[in-house]
Image (spheres, rainbow, N blue to C red):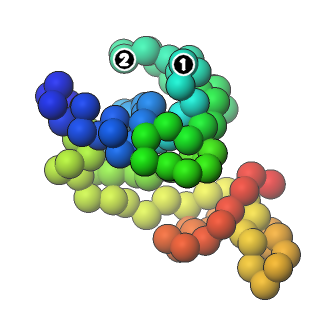
Amino acid sequence: LRANQALDLRALSGNFIIVAGKDAYAVYAHAQTGSLLVSPGDPVVPGQPLARVGHSGNSTAPHLHFQLMEHPDPWQAQGLPCCFRDYEVFQAGAWRPVHNGIPTASDRIRKR
């Protein structure tokens, strides 16, 4: 990202990490200030902690913003669907288990 794009993204997303995968890029945003555990160029493996959940940037409560994209620059990228192996979705006042599902944009989900 160019410097001015990174500053604009930081105002919106706060502390963020972009991880390059084989066929996509993953963005993790709104991390707690000072909690990033990786640096640009570091290798990342599944299950590795990247940062602590926070509410940096344009956020009113701690949460994780996660998305997959087909381009490393979020200003140019298109979002990609993401299938999660196991999670729970909050529906009708209760948590419901989901296996190999794709959450909708309005779903409230958590790790199983």
SS at mark 1 in the image: loop
Q: For the view shown, which residue lies furthest in the bottom direction?
A: 92
Disc 2 to disc 1: CB gap under 8 Å: no
Using the image, determine if residue 4 lies above or below residue 105: above
* Residue 24 on image: x %, y %: 35, 45
Of circles 2 and 1, the one toward us is 1
Horizontally, residue 98 falls left or right of residue 45, namely right
Mark number, residue 21: none
* Residue 66 on image: x %, y %: 49, 49
Question: How would you rate the neighbour count of disc 1 (Cα within 10 Å): few for under 14, some for 14-19, many for 20 or more?
Answer: few
Instruction: Please indicate, yes or no, whether residue 10 appears anywhere in the rendered image.
Output: yes
Q: CA distance from mark 2 to mark 1?
A: 15 Å
Q: Which residue is mark 2?
A: 40
- Give 57 or 92, whichever is nearer the viewer: 57
Residue at point 37%, 60% (across, down): 80
User: Which quadrant of the figure contains the C terminus?
Assistant: bottom right
Lower position in the chain sequence, tag 2 or tag 1: 1
Indicate the quadrant where residue 53 lies.
top right
- Give 63 or 112, whichever is nearer the viewer: 63
User: Which quadrant of the figure contains the N terminus?
Assistant: top left
* Amino acid type of the residue that numbered disc 1 sits on in the rendered structure: Gly
Q: For the view shown, which residue lies furthest in the right direction?
A: 94
* Residue 48 on image: x %, y %: 63, 26
Instruction: Please indicate, yes or no, whether residue 71 appears anywhere in the rendered image.
Output: no
SS at mark 2 in the image: loop
Q: Which residue is mark 1?
A: 34
Q: For the view shown, which residue lies furthest in the front direction?
A: 60
